[in-house]
């Protein structure tokens, strides 16, 4: 049995497929995870996110008041976190919790995008376009094996992702004490450079997720894992989009 590829995406951990019923080969072929099924379910999650994002987007622009979407965004933040955790720990519920996560995250994405858009017209569509372009480029690089997911590659992306997480945690803790890293969050060379690095790390996480899902298909795990695989891709795409939006905002401030 081949070694199962790991991924640094928290939604697709090292034991994701190893600990599900049917690991190692599921009896009924129609009940197994497939690549097409995972792709289709990823599309469904994207539609869910776009639907609620559109709602908060138009609500914000119809009122021009951030307070009109603040409650929805808070619901999205905390509700999305709960849906994310439930999905990770109860993978067999992913058919329900993954769409719930996408719908809730859409509330946040729509509100944040609208606030950026009103300050920098055109930035939202640029961020969406770059996010999907990155997704397709990384998929192409993976399928053509231009990028090979070796153990060294995995360890490098894992370490980099952990570093980003620790960086954000440190920044949040310092913020509680009134310490703000202006150079890091600013539009100077350091701030833009850091954003570029984080965008690249998020993009490489997509490659690891592709590899992991491919392994799950090869092992013939249960079909509900299609929803879980799609959920993992969605988690990375949300992160990637937010980082690209932030990067574009920094670049706009330089003009």
Image: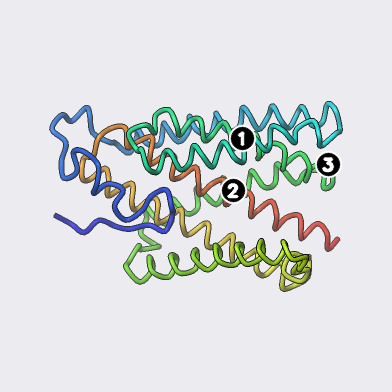
Residue at 40 percent of width and 43 percent of height: 88
Q: Which mark is residue 106?
A: 1
| Disc 2 versus disc 1: nearer the observer | 1
Of the pair 87 and 220, the residue shown nearer to us: 87
Horizontal side of residue 65 vs 38, given as left or right: right
Instruction: Give residue 140's position: percent from left, percent from top.
Output: 44, 52
Instruction: Give residue 230's position: percent from left, percent from top.
Output: 42, 39
Q: Which mark is residue 40?
A: none
Q: Are marks 2 and 3 in contact (CB under 8 Å)?
A: no
The picture quadrant where one finds residue 124 is top right
Other residues around mark 2 within 10 Å, as few (<14) / some (14–19) / many (≥20): many
The picture quadrant where one finds residue 188 is bottom right
Of the pair 10 and 247, the residue shown nearer to us: 10
Residue designated by label 3: 118
Quadrant occupied by the C terminus: bottom right
Q: Is residue 96 above or below residue 166?
A: above
Residue designated by label 2: 131
Of the pair 243 and 22, the residue shown nearer to us: 22
Residue at 82 percent of width and 43 percent of height: 121
Which of the two labelled residues, at mark 2 and mark 3, occupies the earlier sequence position?
3
């Amino acid at each position: 049995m081949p070694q199962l590829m790991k991924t640094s995406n928290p939604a697709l951990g090292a034991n994701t497929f190893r600990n599900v019923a049917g690991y190692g080969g599921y009896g009924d072929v129609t009940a197994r995870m497939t690549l097409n099924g995972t792709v289709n379910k990823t599309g469904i999650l994207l539609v869910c996110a776009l639907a609620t994002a559109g709602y908060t987007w138009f609500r914000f622009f119809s009122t021009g008041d951030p307070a009109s979407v603040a409650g929805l965004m808070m619901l999205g933040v905390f509700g999305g976190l709960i849906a994310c955790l439930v999905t990770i720990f109860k993978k067999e519920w992913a058919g329900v919790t993954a769409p719930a996560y996408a719908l809730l995250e859409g509330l946040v994405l729509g509100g944040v995008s609208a606030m950026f858009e009103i300050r920098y017209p055109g930035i939202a569509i640029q961020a969406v376009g770059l996010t999907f372009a990155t997704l397709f480029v990384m998929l192409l690089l993976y399928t053509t094996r231009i990028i090979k997911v070796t153990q060294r590659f995995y360890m490098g992306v894992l370490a980099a992702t952990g570093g980003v997480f620790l960086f954000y945690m440190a920044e949040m803790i310092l913020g509680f004490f009134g310490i703000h890293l202006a150079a890091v969050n600013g539009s100077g060379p350091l701030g833009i450079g850091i954003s570029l690095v984080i965008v690249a790390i998020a993009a490489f996480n997509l490659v690891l997720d592709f590899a992991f899902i491919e392994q799950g298909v090869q092992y013939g795990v249960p079909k509900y894992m299609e929803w879980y695989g799609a959920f993992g891709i969605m988690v990375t795409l949300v992160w990637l989009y937010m980082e690209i939006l932030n990067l574009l905002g920094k670049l706009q401030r330089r003009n």
